[in-house]
Image (cartoon, helix red, strand yellow):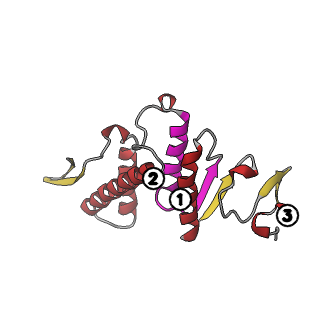
Amino acid sequence: NVAEDVLFEKDQWTWYATPAVLNPLSTHGTGCSLSAAIAASLAIGRDLRAAVAEGKAYVAMTEAEAQALANAFGLPGVPAARPARVPEPDLRRAEWVRAFLGAPALLLLEHPLRGVAREHGAALFAAAGAARARGAAVLWVSDGAHALPPGATRRGRMDGARLAFDTGADAPRGETAS
């Protein structure tokens, strides 16, 4: 299965072929991603044909990465249905896919385990640990210490408009606020 796109420019046609998406129903947003990737390549001086090729490669790579993350988080693929028709636990795990996509330097995970079966937490903990190992920061927003990932080094809480870090016996791993 191949996805083909055609660029018509002046009197020349250029065909671009990439592997087809595993789940063709989960392609919502790929056109926007493709156009943004093409625009980014053009902005750094690539010619149009090269920019389209790079954009197609970027979208194919992102789709493959999303599929791999979905599988790692126990989903058969990226949910393709409208959000109102997707069970809450699957939506939450789809949020994890979006959060980890592209190896970001900062991960913001807001109540990531709310509504998710316990057995899926291990995959999220492993992914967060791997992100930290490659140098990323992880901000895990939770409503209780029970939902902190293994290896959490600091626990903060909102004190009015400021973030206060727990110290002493309550601080994970014995760290104190600096």
Where in the figure is residue 109, as x and y percent of width and height?
Answer: 62, 51
Q: Give the range drawn in magenta.
A: 88-110
Q: In the image, what residue type sits under mark 1?
A: Ala
Q: Check disc 1 and report the residue beneath it.
A: 127
**Mark 2 and mark 3: Cα distance apart in space:** 35 Å
Query: Mark 3 or mark 1, which is nearer the start of the sequence?
Result: 1
Q: Earlier in the sequence, mark 2 or mark 3?
A: 2
Outermost residue on the top side: it is 85
Q: Which amino acid type is marked by label 2?
A: Ala
Camera-nearest residue between 118 and 44: 118
Q: Position of residue 70 (x, y in %)?
A: 44, 48
Residue 167 visible, this angle: no
Give the class, few, some or many, for how many residues have Cα within 10 Å of label 2's Cα (few <14, many ≥20): some
- Residue shown at the point (40%, 62%) measured from the top left: 43
Q: 52 or 26, which is in the foreground? A: 26
Q: In the rendered image, which residue does mark 3 sit on?
A: 169
Position of residue 142 measured from the top left corner of the image (x, y, whole percent): 70, 49
Residue 24, above or below 162:
above
Q: Which disc is residue 72 wearing?
A: 2
Taking the image as shown, residue 63 lies to the left or right of residue 99, namely left
Evaluate whether residue 147 shows in this view.
yes
Spot occupied by residue 63 in the image (x, y as percentages of width and height): 36, 51
User: Element type at marker 2?
Assistant: helix
Q: Earlier in the sequence, mark 2 or mark 1?
A: 2
Quadrant position of the C terminus in the picture: bottom right
Magenta-span inclusion, residue 174:
no
